Image: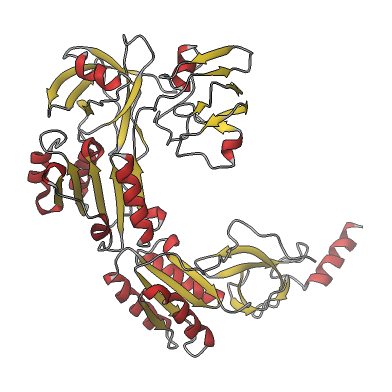
Amino acid sequence: MTTAAAMLSTPVYRPVLPPLPAQHRLLVVQHLALPETAYWQQQLGEEGVPVSLISLNGDMEQLFGSLQQRLSQARVGTRLYICGDESFLWKVHQQARQCGLLNGEIELIRTADSRELYCVHCSTLQTIEPAPLVHCRQCGLQLMVREHFSQRLGAYMGVCNDPFAPYGEAPATVASTSLEEQAS
Amino acid sequence: MSELLDVRVASVRQLTPLVREFTFEAVSGELPGFSAGSHVQVHMPGTGRPLCNAYSLLSDPLQRQYYRIAVRLQEQSRGGSRFMHEQVKEGDVLRLSPPANLFAPHSRAGHHLMIAGGIGITPFMAYIAALEQRGGSMELHYAYRSGLTDTYLEELAARLGAALHPYDGRAGQRLNIRQVLSDQPLGTHVYICGPDSLISDVCQTADALGWPAERIHWEAFAAPEPGEPFVAELADGRTLAVPGDYSLLEALEQAGVPVPNLCRGGVCGQCMTPYSAGEVDHRDLYLSDSERADHLMPCVSRGKGGCTVKLAL
């Protein structure tokens, strides 16, 4: 089975360097301790543009509070850089949009390959490694990882892989066998 | 294309030695509504050639009784502004294309920063009326030459108070674009209307200060620049000689080949026309480099060096 094709909603992460012009840069990091933090702080501060740092201290609400407070004072010419895993990027992205930043003012720096997957059958969000097929951690159904990405959830959509074994019925292999038997 | 509107010239006012204001009312029925930033094309009969210029509507979009425009007399006029200044009298009937809007205020802007140069004030007169009605936050930076292009200055001062920032070029007052753009709250959108040099200065400065393109809006309506004569060949084999002071669009219209269009200034994209041969001087602000390989905007672009441009029309 090959990986599903990219869709309109599949995020594309463009290179952040060289940084676009700005009067002020705001760097939001998921892990303060990672070497990326110091690297990006240094890269973004070249040419003397001030860089402010906000880091996640375990609590997203607190992070959103500081972001909102900073952006309420901000002027046009502020660029936001979000550094973390994909799910973190889009949660902060959504918050920043609500504070008035536009897509063109937000840059995403993805630091991990892991993906967030949303099981459309039992609504469970789960972190997965890159793979076309996984079993839902909650309901056990085999899911095909679609490239359709929800910015709101920061997650890809996982849908039942076997059309002959819909959600709530017997496991995939058994169900399709019994259907074939009925047909014959 | 929508049907043309017949309007009567209800009043004509000379606002400055260079600017004349025209108020139009419907000959019959009601005028179609319009939104702030809209323009109409005024068709000018009796000039011995097809002539049709776009002008911003400056009246309050909420009132439906009349349309109002202001026309600056252009020194390099191909005849359009001269016709409006010298021929059009109260009581005359003119034909307009219905209003179209390529320059609307952004619905989600937290603050509207308007920058006008000279006669570029006109769309903002409608903006200000609309923003006053919805309580929108705004400021206007208006560069003009006193006694020549300071149209509506007194009215603006009364309506806007401290939100009006006037710059009289004759008194050496300069708009400091960098200063204005570097201290705007996050939800701001900037709108520019005026000469090309003003628009490009603001766009470049905004870009250098980190303004994303989504926050920058501009409108430049200028009649097409004349050029060298050239030949257009149509799909049916007919050929048209396009004189130097005609746009290709005008030559096509005169030959009875109408092409849908809205701005006649190379920005809206409506008149995009495919071509298959000929060297084209692209003067529009719409097509991408790759599109230019086989498309042109006949409202402003021309064939180079007297060549023949083969159109798929």
Q: Residue at x 26, y 32 (%)?
A: B57
Residue placed furthest toward the front? B305
Q: Residue at x 16, y 18 (%)?
A: B10
In this orientation, does residue A2 appear? yes
Quadrant of the rendered image containing residue B109: bottom left
Picture layout, residue B17 above or below residue A38: above
* Residue A135 coordinates in the image, percent (x, y): 71, 77
* Residue A27 coordinates in the image, percent (x, y): 42, 77
Q: Viewed as shown, does residue B267 lie left or right of A120?
A: left
Picture layout, residue B155 above or below residue B302: below
Q: Viewed as shown, does residue B113 lie left or right of A30?
A: left
In this orientation, does residue B104 appear? no
- Seen from the viewer's position, the closer of residues B111 and A59 is B111
Picture layout, residue A106 above or below residue B37: below
Q: Quadrant of the N terminus of chain A?
A: bottom right
- Seen from the viewer's position, the closer of residues B300 and B95 is B300
Quadrant of the rendered image containing residue A61: bottom left
User: Colour scheme in the image?
Assistant: secondary structure
* Residue A29 coordinates in the image, percent (x, y): 46, 81
Q: Viewed as shown, does residue B132 lie left or right of A127?
A: left
In this rendering, the count of numbered labels is: 0
Q: Quadrant of the C terminus of chain A?
A: bottom right
Residue placed furthest toward the right? A184
Picture layout, residue B27 above or below residue A46: above
Q: Residue at x 20, y 15 (%)?
A: B86
- Seen from the viewer's position, the closer of residues B106 and A122 is B106
Residue placed furthest toward the bottom? A33
